[in-house]
Image: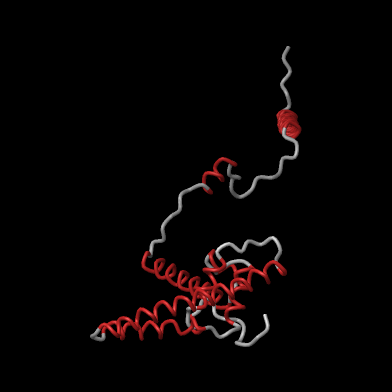
Amino acid sequence: MFRRRNSATSEVEDQDQGAAGFTATDIDSDQSRPGMTPKKGAPTPKRSEAEAKRRQPYQAPTDRKAASKDARKRDAASRLRKSQALQRGEDWAMPPKDRGPVRALARDVVDARRSIGEYYMFMVIVLIVLLVLPGTQAKVIADFVVVGLLTVIVGEGWYVSTKVKKLAAERFPGQSTRGIRMYVIMRSISMRRMRMPKPRVNRGDRV
């Protein structure tokens, strides 16, 4: 009643069924995941994991002494660069009180002339000597010198600042000239070699 299956036929059928099953499964899997690329050597990290790694806090260097030395070198180089730029008169390196075309014009006008205020420091030394001398006569002379010196400095500063305002109105209309008189006076009473930013014009140059 029952027929025995040929063993060779059975093995061939099993192999066919296994191959068919594998192929069908692979096809279904590939169809369900379109654009599937072959596996890499390592799994691709999730977006959340990558962002978490980027957001990790700063890790201090292990060699703190070397890191501190490098930081000091960078700071020194930055200060030197800014100091050199300030001496050249570059606007970005200047303090706010020295910035702007009107202030640059005022410096040029002051530096292009020889002013009495440049000798202010020498006059101060004379005043100190007169004040320490005994007797009232020296003190009276010192008082007259102080009044005369202040009058000359303020008068000269007023004259030069008026000239600067006139030139600024012609060359830079709309620019503020607020505080320019005091700026001119303070520049005038500084010795030329000690002025900062350094003069970029020579005495007698036409501004």
For residue 103, what is the image quadrant? Answer: bottom right
Left or right, 84 with respect to 71, comes to: right
Nearest the eye: 86 or 7: 86
Residue lying farthest to the top in this orientation? 1
Quadrant the N terminus occupies:
top right
Q: Give residue 45's position: percent from left, percent from top.
A: 58, 44
Q: Is residue 31 above or below residue 133?
A: above
Q: Give residue 129's position: percent from left, percent from top.
A: 31, 86
For residue 170, what is the image quadrant? Answer: bottom right
Left or right, 111 with respect to 144, comes to: right
Colour pattern: secondary structure
Nearest the eye: 15 or 62: 62
For residue 25, what is the image quadrant? Answer: top right
Nearest the eye: 129 or 71: 129
Q: Is residue 49 above or below residue 190?
A: above
Q: Residue drawn at (39%, 82%), measured in percent from left and top?
A: 145
Q: Residue drawn at (53%, 65%), measured in percent from left and top?
A: 97
Q: Give residue 157's position: percent from left, percent from top.
A: 54, 74
